[in-house]
Image: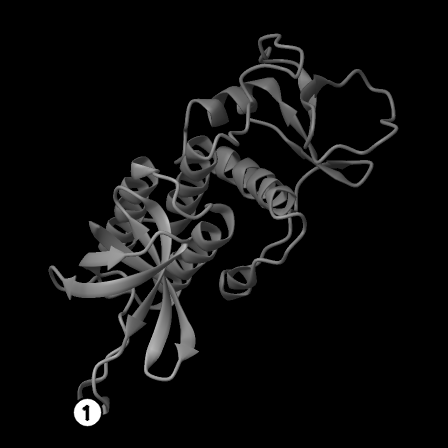
C-alpha cells in the first residue's frame, strides 16, 4: 500500500527499529515498524512533514518499506509547537486504527499550516477539536435540546454530557451539569463564530469535558504545555454559566 502520511508518534520498538503512528490520507491512522538506516546516517522520521510511504501487512501492525519526505516540513516553536503536539495526542488517543477518515487528514493539514502561519491559536484548536468530533461521529449538539426542540435565544440551558441541552427553570439540579449556557451563545457556537471571545470561552470548557468523557478520564499530557486559566466568570452551584 502506498499513501501520503504524517508522523503522529514515534517510539522505540526493537534494535534498529522504531514504531510509527502515521496519519494517512486514505487509511486513517496506521501503525507500522520502520527500520532505521545505519548508525552514521540514522534519522528518526520527524513531525509536521508529509511523507510518501509504502507499507505492507494484513494485521494492525504494518511493515513500512519506504518513507520519503515530499517537501520541507513546517517549523513550529513555542505555543504553536505545543498546540500541534496536543493535536497529535488527540489523534493518537481518539482515532481507531485503519479507519479511513480523509477529512481528518485534511483537517490536520489545515491545522499545521495555520499554526505555521502565526494565526491565533485558540480558535484553531477549538475548530480542530470540533472537526475531530464531527468526523468521529461524536459531535456536540448545541442546536437542539436532548428532546429535539430548537434552542431559544433567551432561554438558559444546562448541558449534560449524556443528555445534551435541557432548559433550566431555576430548580437545583439533582446532578450538576457540565455547564449552563444561554441559548443565543449556544447558537453562535453551532454557527462556528470562532472569533467571538464568548464562543471561545464556552468551547474551551465544553470541549475539555467532552474530551475527558471520550477518553474515560485518561489524562491529556499535552495540556500541561498550553496556557492554563481557570474560568473567572459567573457560576451557579459552582458550575460555570456562559452568556453571549
Q: Most extreme residue toward the left, as rendered?
A: 71
Label 1 element class: helix
Q: Position of residue 231 (x, y in %)?
A: 64, 47
- Compared across the picture, whether 175 is left or right of 43 comes to right
- Compared across the picture, whether 137 is left or right of 213 comes to left
Q: Position of residue 200 (x, y in %)?
A: 49, 39
Q: Most extreme residue toward the bottom, as rendered?
A: 40
- Residue at 15% of width from left, 63% of height from top? 69
Q: How many marks?
A: 1
Q: Hey, which quadrant is residue 167 in on the image? A: top right
Q: Hey, which quadrant is residue 88 in on the image? A: bottom left
Q: Position of residue 163 (x, y in %)?
A: 69, 24
Which residue occupies the foreground of this view, 208 or 216?
216
- Residue at 25% of width from left, 54% of height from top? 5
Which residue occupies the foreground of this view, 108 or 53?
53
Q: Most extreme residue toward the front, as rendered?
A: 58
On screen, residue 17 above or below 213 = below
- The colour mode here is one colour
Q: Position of residue 61 (x, y in %)?
A: 39, 59
Q: Which residue is mark 1?
A: 40
On screen, residue 157 above or below 123 = above
On screen, residue 90 above or below 141 = below
Q: Hey, which quadrant is residue 233 in on the image? A: top right
Q: How dense is the environment of label 1, judged by Cα within 10 Å: few (below 14), some, or many (20 and up)?
A: few
- Compared across the picture, whether 149 is left or right of 54 comes to right
Which residue occupies the foreground of this view, 35 or 47?
35
User: Which image quarter is the C terminus in?
Assistant: top right
Amino acid at each position: 500500500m502506498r499513501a501520503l502520511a504524517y508522523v503522529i508518534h514515534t517510539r522505540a520498538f526493537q534494535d534498529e527499529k522504531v514504531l510509527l503512528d502515521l496519519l494517512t490520507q486514505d487509511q486513517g491512522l496506521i501503525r507500522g515498524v520502520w527500520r532505521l538506516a545505519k548508525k552514521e546516517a540514522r534519522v528518526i522520521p520527524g513531525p509536521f512533514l508529509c511523507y510518501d510511504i509504502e507499507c505492507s501487512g494484513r494485521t494492525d501492525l504494518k511493515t513500512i518499506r519506504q518513507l520519503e519526505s515530499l517537501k520541507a516540513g513546517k517549523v513550529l516553536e513555542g505555543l504553536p509547537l505545543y498546540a500541534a503536539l496536543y493535536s497529535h495526542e488527540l489523534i493518537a488517543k481518539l482515532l481507531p486504527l485503519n479507519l479511513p477518515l480523509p477529512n481528518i487528514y485534511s483537517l490536520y493539514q489545515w491545522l499545521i499550516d495555520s499554526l505555521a502561519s502565526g494565526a491565533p491559536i485558540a480558535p484553531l484548536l477549538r475548530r480542530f477539536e470540533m472537526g475531530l468530533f464531527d468526523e468521529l461521529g461524536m459531535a456536540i449538539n448545541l442546536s437542539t435540546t436532548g428532546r429535539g426542540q430548537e434552542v431559544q435565544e433567551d432561554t438558559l440551558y444546562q448541558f449534560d454530557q449524556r443528555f445534551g441541552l435541557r432548559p433550566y427553570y431555576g430548580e437545583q439540579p439533582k446532578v450538576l451539569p457540565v455547564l449552563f449556557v444561554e441559548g443565543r451563545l449556544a447558537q453562535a457556537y453551532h454557527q462556528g463564530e470562532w472569533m467571538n471571545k464568548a464562543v471561545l470561552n464556552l468551547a474551551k470548557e465544553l470541549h475539555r469535558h467532552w474530551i475527558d468523557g471520550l477518553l474515560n478520564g485518561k489524562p491529556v499530557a499535552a495540556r500541561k504545555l498550553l496556557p492554563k486559566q481557570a474560568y473567572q466568570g459567573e457560576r451557579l452551584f459552582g458550575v460555570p454559566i456562559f452568556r453571549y
